[in-house]
Amino acid sequence: MWSQERHDKILLLLRERHRLTTDEAARELGVSRETVRRDLIELEQGGKLARVHGGAVQSEVPAEASYAERAQSRRRQKQAIARQAVTLVKPGMSLFIDAGSTTHALAQALAQAQGLRVITNSVAVCDAMAGRQGHEVLMLGGEFVPEISATFGGFTVAEIARHRVDIALVSPTALDARQGAMSYLWAEVAVAQAMLARARQRVLLADASKLGQGSRMQVCDCADIDVLVTDNEADPQELDRLVRAGVGRVLF
């Protein structure tokens, strides 16, 4: 397991348990206690957790909200974004859709479209679209992460590279004119980057609360975004900065 994958898993375990011992982390990750200690030191230096005797606790710096929390927040805005994104999709198109509460709303809206080929790492997206309106839905293999209900890892990325699609629709944690699109977990970044690299059109879905914000790791530059779909609460000045930074066009 790569160090970034271990870091992601440690942060997910801390989010769930709030406190994690070195022995618990070593068992969960299948690595030595010394490897865990090095990982905890690196994560503490990055401000992601606080080390205590025998393990670590969550940092006072707020982490990304859990998937369940995100699914319940700003639902009206996410549904509005989904309705706008659907206008980009034509019958018979092939799509990449990544895992997230906004892309889940998109999948629910796309369920009524016709004959799409959808490739996703999200169980929620599969559940929303499989067996409806003649859609072909492919669930990507990989390591299943129950906290997000999606697959990640090197196998997932390799599977993505086997396909070429019309549109990739991904939802990052944050989007800033200087830093571009960003997400919290390296595993999420790797999947989003792979999807964007294999799509003819690259579409990002981000509600107004994500604009002008930053996160841990960059997904892509603004110049790599063909279309940004957001909601009507977005700050016009922030949208202008994003367009000047290279975003192709904005829908809201």
Image (cartoon, grey):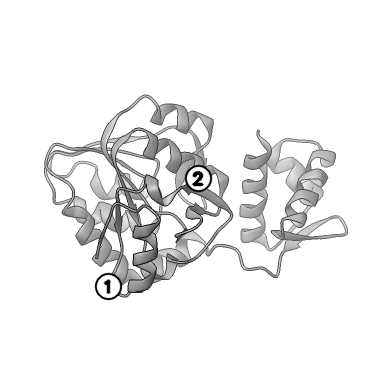
Q: Viewed as shown, does residue 77 lie left or right of 9?
A: left
Q: Viewed as shown, does residue 188 lie left or right of 28?
A: left
Give amino acid for label 1: Asn
The residue located at (37%, 72%) in the rendering is: 237
The residue located at (38%, 60%) in the rendering is: 242
Question: Which residue reaches farthest right?
Answer: 53
The answer for how far apart the CA atoms under marks 2 and 1 are is: 26 Å
Residue toward you, 246 or 167: 246
Identify the residue under disc 1.
232
Query: Can residue 51 be seen?
Result: yes
The quadrant of the image that shows the N terminus is top right
Residue 111: assigned label: none
Identify the residue under disc 2.
189
Query: Can residue 234 be seen?
Result: no
Q: Position of residue 212 (x, y in %)?
A: 46, 66
Q: Viewed as shown, does residue 41 lie left or right of 248?
A: right
Q: Position of residue 220 (x, y in %)?
A: 45, 46
Question: From the viewer's perspective, is residue 71 above or below residue 134?
Answer: below
Categorize mark 1 by other alpha carbons within 10 Å: few (<14), some (14-19), many (20+): few
Question: Which residue reaches farthest top?
Answer: 162
Q: Earlier in the sequence, mark 2 or mark 1?
A: 2
The quadrant of the image that shows the C terminus is bottom left
Give amino acid for label 2: Val
Q: Viewed as shown, does residue 157 lie left or right of 107?
A: right
Front: mark 2 or 1: 1
The residue located at (34%, 59%) in the rendering is: 243
Residue 34 appears in which quarter of the rendering?
A: top right
Q: Position of residue 32 (x, y in %)?
A: 81, 36
The residue located at (20%, 51%) in the rendering is: 110
Q: Secondary structure at mark 2?
A: helix
Q: Secondary structure at mark 1?
A: loop
